[in-house]
Image (tube, grey):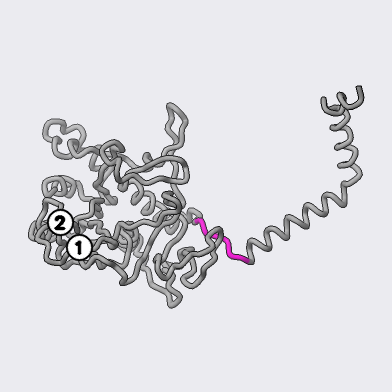
Amino acid sequence: MKQVVGEIQKHQPLFIGLVQDLDTPDKEISKQQLENILGETPNLYFTCNSSKSINESEALGNPPDTENAFGFSDVSRDDKVVRRSLLMIGDKSANPHCKSPYAFGLVLALNYLKEVKEINHQSLPDGKIKIGNLILPTFPIKSERVGGYQKFDAGTGGLQMLLNYRISKDRPTNSKQLDRIAKRITIENFTNLSRNPKNTKKIEESVKNRIVLIGVTDKEFAKNKLFQTPYQQEITPVWLHAQMISQLLSGVIDRRPFLRPWFGWENVAWIYAWSLVGGFIIWRFRSGINILLVTILKRSPISNRRYR
């Protein structure tokens, strides 16, 4: 891992994010190795899982005491489908080695906005997050009913908002793809530049001053960690975090619309408004509708058979 990160760092990325939980004892990397890598690469960030309960005495996998270098990788699911982006979980982590209150994607997005656009964020008294002059449309903290959610509890589930997936169209098949929203570069391309120096400029253009995520893109290799999306497509963790980062950056920088749930009064107003529209149409054009319905019935096969 140190070699890969070092090769990527040569091309001056703004931030590097490793989408692999390193806070479990089965990872073949020691605490000392992590501290050395972080010391040499201050723009490197890792994921950790806050819901895993891990023994503090484990020798392997324990991340160093550099909380700013981590963001949690936990996600929220609705019947196994990821429709929401989990942004904050507070201090309720079950994992003593994953105390970061912010999601991995949020950590990278906030640092990018601060570094490149000089846009800072702040936590508001009502629990929401304000980035620049934009308040993220998160679910309310104290509400059991939000949109289609009848028993939503942000107090235990964390600060969340609807995930607005970015879709890329595959030109040959014209199919919609969720894992084609960013350029993909294999690790071999970084480590074998000496054999193929022509790729150096292309890679530098793709990496310099950007956020680079390291993770598995092969669905077969990561088949036990795939996430189901509302588009009937499964994506690997690295693409899910890329979607979350893309939504935050494009929403703040490009003003791409965020999705937000409707509250109770909005649903009532919507139904009431369309009831009035439907009632007015029937009242205004009732004679024409009656004539149209009679004409359709007379010309239908069922009507003809009745009068034979």
Percent x, y of residue 78: 45, 53
For the point 38% across and 41% down, the residue is 234
- Per the rendered image, the range of residues in magenta is 259-264
In the picture, residue 205 is in which quadrant?
top left
- Secondary structure mostly taken by the magenta-highlighted segment of the chain: loop
Q: In this view, does 28 lie to the left or right of 175?
A: left
Chain-order first, disc 2 or disc 1 = 2
Element type at mark 1: loop
Contact? badges 2 and 1 (CB < 8 Å): yes
Q: Does the magenta stretch include residue 262?
A: yes
**Numbered mark located on residue 25 in the image:** 2
Task: Assess disc 2: are there few (<14), some (14-19) or many (≥20) residues with their C-alpha within 10 Å of its C-alpha.
Answer: some
Task: Assess disc 1: are there few (<14), some (14-19) or many (≥20) residues with their C-alpha within 10 Å of its C-alpha.
Answer: some
User: Looking at the image, which residue sits at the far top?
Assistant: 308
Percent x, y of residue 282: 84, 49
What amino acid is found at the position of numbered circle 1 in the picture?
Ile
Q: Is residue 257 left or right of residue 122?
A: right
- Residue 116 seen anywhere in this rendered image of the structure: no
Element type at mark 2: loop
What amino acid is found at the position of numbered circle 2 in the picture?
Pro
Q: Distance between the residues labelled 2 and 1?
A: 8 Å
Q: Is residue 303 magenta?
A: no
**Numbered mark located on residue 54 in the image:** 1
